[in-house]
Amino acid sequence: MKPYGMPARSPRTGLFLLVAFSALLIMPCSVSGATPPPLPSLALSISNATLSGDEDLVVSAAWSRDASFYRPPRSIDVLIYSVSSGSLVAGYTIPGDDPTAADDTARHFRGTVPSSELPEGRLLLVVTDPVSGAEARALIDVTEPGPDYPAAQAKRYAETAFFAVAGVLLAVLVAALALLLRHP
């Protein structure tokens, strides 16, 4: 029953509005900016795919962009993973060439990874541009473990443990401060 003075609405109008609203929800809509810009190119070359104990790994990377809107990075990240276990073995940062150069469409990176800090076995070298996320990969074989590998690995574990303990202590201190400020 309709209230006094209100015009009657036909059931067709309600059905039409329901169908129109449903069609708007179902039809795909284009969203501008939904596609990320194309990634720059990151080409990787290494000095040798098989390392013995006395030679270091020379890593060279060339970053270039054609239609990418990403700015050139100042450095690239090199992460080395063990193929057998998938665990992170080492991480390095390699600085780029002169960042004041006028040409910002190409950048070159060159650095050395000491083989004395690498374990024996097959390793995956992943080079990543920290600005855009572009990456390149290469496999290397290390024939014998480096003499400094146990000490370098222990140092990495100690740094990780330090940051974990520091994070927990910071959380406890923030919670204690919040409790002190809440109670007068």
Image (cartoon, rainbow, N blue to C red):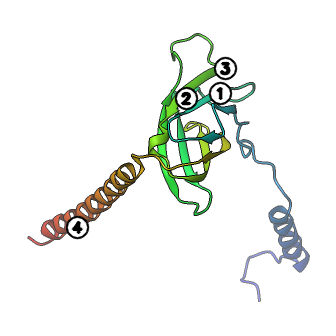
Circle 4 sits on which residue? Answer: 172
Label 2, label 3: how far apart the Cα atoms are: 11 Å
Q: In this rendering, which labeled residue sits more in front, label 3 or label 1? A: 1
What's under tag 2, amino acid-wise?
Answer: Pro
Categorize mark 4 by other alpha carbons within 10 Å: few (<14), some (14-19), many (20+): few
Query: Percent position (x, y) of residue 13?
Result: 87, 72
Viewer-nearest of discs 1 and 2: 1
Q: Earlier in the sequence, mark 1 or mark 2?
A: 1
Residue beneath disc 1: 63
| Callouts 3 and 1 close, C-beta under 8 Å | no
Question: Which mark is first along the chain, 1 or 4?
Answer: 1
Picture quarter with the C terminus? bottom left
Disc on the earlier residue, 2 or 3: 2
Q: In the rendered structure, which disc, 3 or 4, sits on the residue that comes first in sequence? A: 3
Which residue lies at the image location 61% right of the left edge and 44% below the top edge? 126
Would residue 14 be found to the left or right of residue 153 on screen?
right
| The disc label shown at residue 73, or none | 2
Which residue is situated farthest in the bottom direction here?
1
Disc 4 is placed on an element classified as helix
Q: Amino acid at mark 1?
A: Trp
Label pair 3/4, CB-CB below 8 angstroms: no
